[in-house]
Image: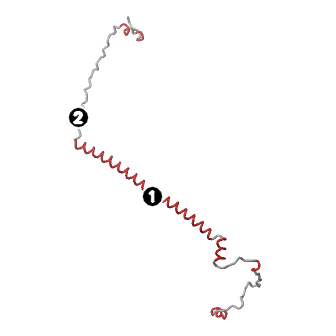
Amino acid sequence: MARSSTAYDFEYFEGTRNKRIEAAPAYVQKPVAKPPVARQKPKVRIFRTVLIVALFIASAMLMLYSNVKMNEVDVEINNANAQVSELRSKNKKLDMKLSQTFSSNNIELIATAELGMIRAQVANVEYFSVPVRNIVSVKNQDEGFFSKLLRLF
């Protein structure tokens, strides 16, 4: 039976399949020998291990130091904020005390109690007219030495 198509290959079903032998290549490649890996000396290995451990410990210490410094700065900031709030409250108290001191009721109380002043009554107010030159002279004033000297010139 001549095969005209590979689609009708019944050798797989009949069990009489001939083993196909593949032809070996005409040339054979020789495996390339790798140079032997130079083993590291134990001293170099130990040094490398110690160096890695030292770097790890140094980085851990650096992280710890930076955290401590950050905490110290945070404490300083909190203290400064507490001082600022305390000073602001003192400032408000002083502003209130100042406004109370200069209030018109307090000034009137000090004027009447300590200085002996009285509130102006309509009967106590006198009006007078000033001449055209806007000069007021007081009669019976005791003149001092400098006043007399100035009047001479």
Badge 2, how many Cα within 10 Å: few under 14, some, many 20+? Answer: few
Image quarter where the N terminus lies is top left
Q: Nearer the viewer's eye, disc 2 or disc 1?
A: 1
Which residue is rendered at x = 37% and y = 10% of the image? Answer: 12
Residue situated in front as seen by the camera: 109 or 137: 109
**Which circle's residue, 2 or 1, is located before the other in the chain?**
2
Q: Secondary structure at mark 2?
A: loop
Mark 1 residue type: Glu
What amino acid type should be assigned to the residue bearing mark 2? Answer: Pro
* Image vertical order of residue 132 relative to residue 47, above or below: below
**Percent x, y of residue 144:** 64, 92
Q: Nearer the viewer, residue 71 or 121?
A: 121
Residue 17 location, x and y as percent?
34, 9
Which residue is tagged 1? 76
Q: Mark number for residue 41?
A: none
Residue 141 picture location, percent across and down: 69, 90
On the image, the x and y values in percent for residue 151 come to: 67, 93
In the structure shown, which secondary structural element does the residue marked by tag 1 occupy?
Answer: helix
| C-beta proximity under 8 Å, tags 2 and 1 | no
Residue positioned most to the top: 1
Q: Is residue 44 left or right of residue 81?
A: left
Marks 2 and 1 sit apart, C-alpha to C-alpha, by 62 Å
Point 23% across, 38% down: residue: 39
Total marks placed: 2
Residue for badge 2: 36
